Amino acid sequence: MASTSNPQLRIREATPADVDRLVDLFFAAFSSDPANKLMYPEGDSASAREKFASRMLSPNTAAITGPGRGPNGQHPKAAEILVVVAELTATHEPEGKGGEIVAFSRWMWNKERREDWDWDYFQDLTVESMGEGANLEVANAFIGGLKELERKHARGDPNIGL
């Protein structure tokens, strides 16, 4: 951590320039997490980090392929993505002068009610969506379980979630 005098946290929206640092923070924070160890038994690979980075500031629609699920062939609506970072900075540093990013959160915000076809699905994860070295059986069980909780509790209603 950078040495600062009179340190404070500054919260701001993430930018594309922050993505590499956010990927580093994520994998450093969760590399010893049991679920992450099961999903990536050999540790994170370069392709896993690349796939994670590619969806950091974008909706998780990269893995949706083929014809859409909607009655007219449309694909599901993408949630708005909001990523905020916490920077450790000195009080005297002007806005725009970057501090050290020490934390972040990524929120998916569905602002409007969605039709059943638009939210009640789960497309299995693949190497193309998770990266090399991923245990797809575990990843699909874990992420699929989270999706099932979303189905149960959000039911397509407007919501915000991690």
Image (cartoon, grey):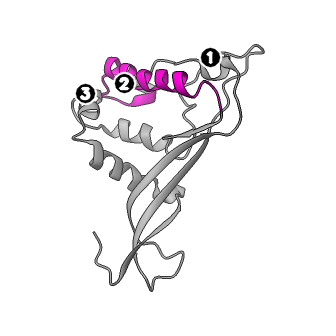
Q: Tell me the crowding category of disc 1: few under 14, some 14 to 19, or many 20 or more residues within 10 angstroms, Cα based.
A: few
Type of the residue with mark 1: Gly
Left or right: 127 as drawn, with respect to 106: left
What residue sits 35% from the left and 47% below the top?
Answer: 26
Residue 9 in the image: x percent, y percent?
Answer: 42, 70
Towards the viewer: 1 or 34: 34
Q: Are marks 3 and 2 in contact (CB under 8 Å)?
A: yes
- Rounded to the nearest angstrom, the CA distance separating label 3 from label 2 is 10 Å
| Above or below, comparing residue 22 to residue 50 in the picture | below
* Residue 126 seen in the current view: no
**In the rendered image, which residue does mark 1 sit on?**
66
Type of the residue with mark 2: Phe
What residue sits 52% from the left and 58% below the top?
Answer: 14
| Above or below, comparing residue 101 to residue 81 in the picture | below
Residue 102 in the image: x percent, y percent?
Answer: 36, 62
Towards the viewer: 153 or 97: 153
Please state, as top left, top right, bottom left or bottom right, where the N terminus lies in the image: bottom left
